[in-house]
Image (tube, rainbow, N blue to C red):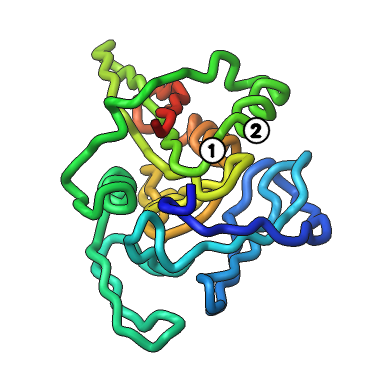
Amino acid sequence: MARWIRLAMVAVVGVLLLGTRIARSHVEARWRRDGFTATMLKTSARRPGMQVAVPELINGHFAPPVGATSCQPWTGRDSYGRLESVGGYDCFESVNYLITGDASRCVYRSWAREELKEPESAAAWNAFEESLRVGDVVEFVATERSASGVVTTSPFHAQLCIGAGGVMYGANNTPAFDVVRGVPTIVKHWDVCRPEDYYYALRSMDGAWGMCGYTQRYRVVVYRRP
């Protein structure tokens, strides 16, 4: 476990009332000797906010700060003043990088795999997130149907568990989407969130995808770290 990550969950902070089901995962990051502290505010009606510590090193690989742009290389200094640089990655590349150090080398899909059976159930989500352990990978798999009836299925997003109970980190991991000229568009930041919040952010775009002539449905899969 220590080989993977040193991460502490710290105090639960006050409840933030939100007017909608989904909100951007607002985080504030600052340097700590053992990593970054990020305040992850609640993004659903039944969840409080919390503070999480995002370590500088995950499995020996430098983790960019929450809020850093993920689509282009990031360079900055760590808490000891040493210059660090991380490439510009999509979500899958970021998870590969944090696990192996090589953004193009995927090993987690060979791990034991389980699927969340009832993604619309609060109880199922509670059990699913409580089962997650540091190093597990969650993928959201999209099945898309076009207006002409063509169906395709492919992984849409991946995130790495960095804290028990479903604290997930990675590139493009903000649980919110921008709509650019009518098309849902990911927010390209390194971010922390819970899997449930990301799932409902995806579902919040159902109407926008419908206007584009597509129907999207999502399965949630976890790959258990050996």
Which residue is labeled 2 in the image? 130
**Residue situated in front as seen by the camera: 71 or 58:** 58
Residue that appears at 37% across and 26% down: 141
- Among all residues in the image, which is located at the extreme bottom? 81
Please state which amino acid type lies under the numbered disc 1: Arg
Does 223 sit above or below residue 9? above
Circle 2 packing at 10 Å, graded few (<14), some (14-19), many (20+), is few
Q: Quadrant of residue 224?
A: top left
Location of residue 150 in the rendering, given as x and y in whole percent from the top left corner: 24, 13
Q: CA distance from mark 2 to mark 1?
A: 8 Å
Circle 1 packing at 10 Å, graded few (<14), some (14-19), many (20+), is some
Which residue is labeled 1 in the image? 133
Please state which amino acid type lies under the numbered disc 2: Glu
Image quadrant holding the C terminus, namely top left
Q: Quadrant of residue 223?
A: top left
Question: Does dot 2 land on a helix, a strand or a loop?
Answer: helix
Does 49 sit above or below residue 135? below
Q: Which mark is residue 96?
A: none
Location of residue 42 in the rendering, given as x and y in whole percent from the top left corner: 70, 51
Question: Does dot 1 land on a helix, a strand or a loop?
Answer: loop
- Among all residues in the image, which is located at the extreme top? 149
Left or right: residue 105 compared with residue 198 = left
Q: Quadrant of residue 216?
A: top left
Location of residue 205 in the rendering, given as x and y in whole percent from the top left corner: 49, 36
Residue that appears at 47% across and 48% down: 177
Location of residue 67 in the rendering, given as x and y in whole percent from the top left corner: 46, 67
Left or right: residue 153 compared with residue 16 = left
**Residue situated in front as seen by the camera: 222 or 144:** 222
Residue 178 in view of the camera? no
